[in-house]
Amino acid sequence: MELAQISSNLLYASFFIYLVATFIFGATIKVSNENRNKKIANVGIGLTIVGFLTQVGYFFTRWFAAGHAPVSNLFEFMTFFGMMLVFGFIVLYFIYRITLLGLFALPVALLIIAYASMFPTEISPLVPSLKSHWLYIHVTTAALGQAILAISFAAGLIYLIRQVNQEKATKRTRWLEFIIFSILCVVGYIAVGTTFGAMNYETTFEAPVNGSMTQITYEMPAIAGPKDGELLTDHAFGPLFETPGWMQGVNAPVKFNTVIWSLLAGLVIYGLLRVLLRKRVAKSIQPFLRSASPRLVDEVSYRAVAIGFPVFTLGALIFASIWAQEAWDRFWGWDPKEVWALITWFFYAAFLHLRLTRGWEGERSAWLAVIGFAIIMFNLIAVNLIISGLHSYA
Amino acid sequence: MSRITCECGHVNPEGTVLCEACGKPFEENQHLNDNKPEQLLNMRYDGSARRSQTYQRTFVDKVWNFFSSVKIGVSIIILLVVASAVGTIFPQEMYLPPGSDPTTHYEEQYGMLGQIYYQLGFHNLYSSWWYLLIIAMLGVSIVIASIDRFIPLYKTLRKQKPKRHVNFMKKQRIFGETINENIDYSKLRKNLRSKRYKLFEEDGHLLAEKNRFSRWGPYVNHIGLILVLLGSMLRFVPAMYMDEFLWIREGETKEIAGTEGKYYIENEDFILETYDANDENNSQFQESLQNQANPVPENYQTNAVIYKRTDLPIVPGKEPELEKVKDAEARVNHPIQLENGISLYQASYQLNEFQSMTFKLHDKGNEDTNYGEFTVDLTEPKDEYTLDDGTVVRLDRYYPEFELDDGVPTQVSKFPRNPAFIFEVQRPGEEPEVSFAGIGVNIDATGENDYKVGLVDFGVRDVTGLTVKRDYTLPFIAFGAAIFMIGVIQGMYWNHRRIWIQPKETGVWVAGHTNKNWFALKKDIDQTLEDTGIEPPVDQQEEKDKRERGKDDGISTD
């Protein structure tokens, strides 16, 4: 078998193992016997480690197949990010032994890896600016930093679902539902994308882009068509309306259409859950988190920031600057990706100051952890896809 | 100055919250740390006397208090976060496509919002005075807030005594009372030492302390940040920073900007390589390359020769005498380094720029006739060209890059990307004629010409764009960044832990404090107390949480 094929099989395997591990961590909730609980948790973390090693296998086989570290486009970066998230979870698990953390951190990693596979997955050659050892050093350290910070989100979410009073609907319960809805939108996007991908769905439009007629191909049914676009595919669905003109670029209508699909799919899943559960989703999860000590979960959330912040600084700012000096002749250039890395850094600096000197612990700290993760995801996805800049390699 | 004398005899500075020596809470100052009776002590900065909390009278006090507040510091950070984010909504001016005019670009591309963005100056946000002012305020805040906290905290931790006040002990988050007269103190000391605690004793009272240095982490990293900020300001000193750009055509030799005429560079060859999908070495990329509409670049490279001028001092106007220093390659990620701190970066290129154009003169109606050819060297166009048969072609105007604007040629740029000429052709003994000739255009303005100037050949060459940089601020900034990293690791990866052991008539009291990571402190204490006869203390905060949760833990039971 070809090395590249082995590599992608290993990635599938690790995905599957993480999935099983998640269910095993889930089983610890229902088991109240402490000894049995411990045993199940051991199986869970053991499987997680096996999954992690399998993914490490994916990483290095792909490295050998490509001839460069597989962190050079969105697919590779995000799978690596997911891998580092699992690594961060393993480290924190052995410090604090909270099985619930696995139930939240692993799904986040799973979602990220699944999301990654929505991008082109073939091995691509390096453009000249990426041909540097700093590719490995900068990207891996930055991803590790972000992943550890993401653990803080997982713990923060446990804290919020555990602690936010669900007796009646408040602003906090609504925000909490919004976070869950956002996660479900990602699930929805992956489901819709995979479905239409399996069907090889394609609709082609011809539309004016920057003054010349261009063909635009949709891989999902077009809810929002290109502005002034003409449908070329026969018997195709849509479009129901046109993409607003201020969205620039060839891919803007496709991206806009994808966002609409994700939101719709998210709404459908969320709606179904509400109908089935007949109460707020967070309220339904809350009783399962009873065993978690809020103070300990809060400490994990903070500890992840304390560990991740220096790593992030080193990878996403310092190593980044050194490389930028070498490749682009300036260590700092206010490229959108750089700016958002700085924003992330500022945000977590504020998080630490509020916590350490103003006593923002518990719920406030947990909300901040969620916002921090949103900023990281924005930098990871939105900056690449919406705001174009020097970093748009994908 | 109204000093506070504690019952333990220690004299504390004004504004002290907890006695520096014994930790006794001073009634009159508890509000400074938001301490309330019945609650655990707020241990921030160990209750030391901070200037900002003590003096609020003069203008200087007020400025000091403003900037020393973490609330203000965080507000400044949030302001920076919002402003920075706004700057990424639309591209900054420096990232606009070359040649675009910002006064119209934003409106054309982004409509009304773009226009407003431009009008507000957000197209140059990061160098705007107000953005720099916010950063400066952050710098001031960092300095003042650090001094305000570091000095009193340092003094307090130096003056602390093992013997603590009763109220200090009881109001620690980790606290426990043990009633037992058989306590193995030597075992306890051994356990603490094996966990690398430093022990201090006073009348049988014990203080075990570890990693005090981690308390200095924040101040060290703040020093690093200030160094980075100062280092960035050095860029405004002209001698510290140089940034020039060189366009060099293949075969050309140019003076390297910023070297005072001492160094020259010759562009021997510019190379642009793209990935070849058929190359066996690229087989792993085949699928990816086939999915790309455009060729994927593999390498941008300038093969250059560096020369040094030997006829120093330089006489203006004199042809330089050059001595070869070295052959050098500038590739992306691999700049050419010169011995004087200058680096040349492969930054841009222009392929196939016109170098020369060859024309022939023929009858207007018959292209097979030929009255002679001439070649225009675009780097040095001559005023007139004489053909073999004596015809004189005068070059009236040269447009390096032209565009027809309502039938009138206009010059777009001075780079020979689309050259065109106005020739005046004079055959011996005939009236002169005017011809306009370029690539794919040949206009006879009067319509009465007998002859035509036709393009027969052209020569092209590549142009490389190199940035010339010298940045002496880099070592300062790198040093600042290193200090920052040391500080942040020192503060984040270690915790300051203290355990107080107080012998009582019937047993012993234990209290513990850490600046963070209580879980680990509790584990440390529990392990050191094993087999010593002392019971593990409790986390009073956790106990309180549990009690409160018992009443209302937010979980509905339906």
Image: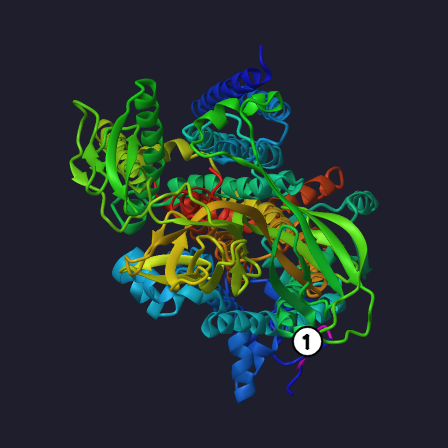
- Numbered marks: total: 1
Question: Which of B388/A235 is in front?
Answer: B388
SS assignment for the magenta stretch, majority: loop
The residue type indicated by label 1 comes to Cys
In the displayed structure, A180 sits above or below B238; it is above
Quarter assignment of residue A255: top left
Q: Is residue A139 visible?
A: no
Residue B300 colored magenta? no
Question: Which of B133/B286 is in front?
Answer: B286
Percent position of residue B48, x then y: 64, 71
Magenta segment, which residues? Answer: B4-9
Quarter assignment of residue A143: top right
Q: Is residue A67 visible?
A: yes
In the displayed structure, A345 sits above or below B383; it is above
For this view, does B312 lie left or right of residue B120?
Answer: right
Question: Which of A25/A294 is in front?
Answer: A25
Q: Residue furthest front?
A: B429
Percent position of residue B523, x then y: 66, 41
User: Which residue position is annotated with label 1?
Assistant: B6
Secondary structure of the residue carrying tag 1 is loop
Residue sitting at x 59%, y 51%: B464
Question: Pointer 1: residues within 10 angstroms few (<14), some, or many (20+)?
Answer: some
In the displayed structure, B474 sits above or below A254; it is below
Percent position of residue A316, x then y: 58, 48
For this view, does B214 lie left or right of residue A321?
Answer: right
For the N terminus of chain B, give its image quadrant. Answer: bottom right
* Chain holding disc 1: B
Residue B7 colored magenta? yes
Percent position of residue A36, x then y: 53, 19
In the displayed structure, B368 sits above or below A321; it is above
Question: Which of B328/B146 is in front?
Answer: B328
Q: Residue furthest top?
A: A1
